Image: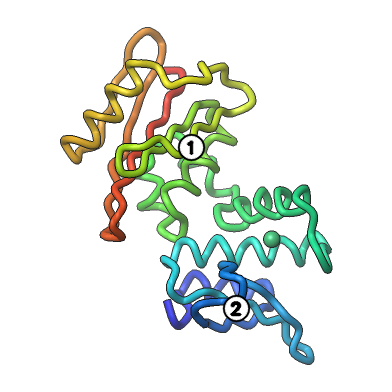
Amino acid sequence: MTEATPWAHDFARKHKLTLRFETPLPGKVPAYKYEDGDLMVVVLDSSLPDERQHFSLAHEAAHLILGHTGDVSPQEEQEANFLASELLLPDPPFSDFAYENLRGLKDAFPQASFEALARRRQQFIPSVLTIMDDGLITRRLTSDEFSAPFQITPHERHTLQECLHTGEDQDETGDGIRLHATYVDEGRGVVRVLLIVEES
Ligand SMILES: [Zn+2]
């Protein structure tokens, strides 16, 4: 986006931030902020997808709320990401929708990416999330309360492949678990499949 989406506009106003858009940003960061007189300005990389910009905006707001100044530590970055997820997808109402699959969540919260939705969902529903980009597994994230094998299981791999090859979401239940895979092709040159495994 080169001007604020309605979500970004509302968020910025609520957090008293002024938005500017540029690309590329120095150091190839997704966003940065600076004070300009009385204004706190957040600069977003306009070449990034809207959902990425929204998360970056929430991340910068999180640093301000947490009082992080100067060079931030990796620990502070993690804290900012955690709070950014809550700011992007506040609860309420998020937990009212958490049992929906990712498709339903995306309809309810279009401001967030499928990945951000899946990760926030894990805070309410213990699960293991596996993300595959163009056929390669790029992330495997397990909720604290869920025990899952470190390695992907053959059943999970099969469901991921089925989703990738058919281009259709998959939903399977058996042996006390549910697997659901979501197919995402947003025309950015990468086909992504997100697989969630949870108790059924
Ligand atoms: Zn940061």
The image shows residue 15 at horizontal and vertical percentages of 68, 72
The answer to whether one can see residue 101 in this image is: no
- Name which quarter of the figure residue 179 lies in: top left
Rendered residue at 32%/16% (across/down): 155
Q: Quadrant of the C terminus?
A: top left
Residue at mark 1 to residue at mark 2: CA–CA distance? 28 Å
Vertical side of 8 occupied by 87: above or below: above
The image shows residue 134 at horizontal and vertical percentages of 30, 43
- The residue labelled by disc 2 is 43
The image shows residue 138 at horizontal and vertical percentages of 45, 39
Query: Is the residue indicated by label 1 positioned so its CB lies within 8 Å of ligand 1?
Result: no
Give SS at disc 1: strand
The answer to whether one can see residue 198 in this image is: yes
Vertical side of 130 occupied by 56: above or below: below
- The residue labelled by disc 1 is 139
Rendered residue at 67%/66% (across/down): 60
Tell which of 157 and 178 is nearer to you: 157
Q: Amino acid at mark 1?
A: Arg
Residue at the top extreme of this rendering: 175
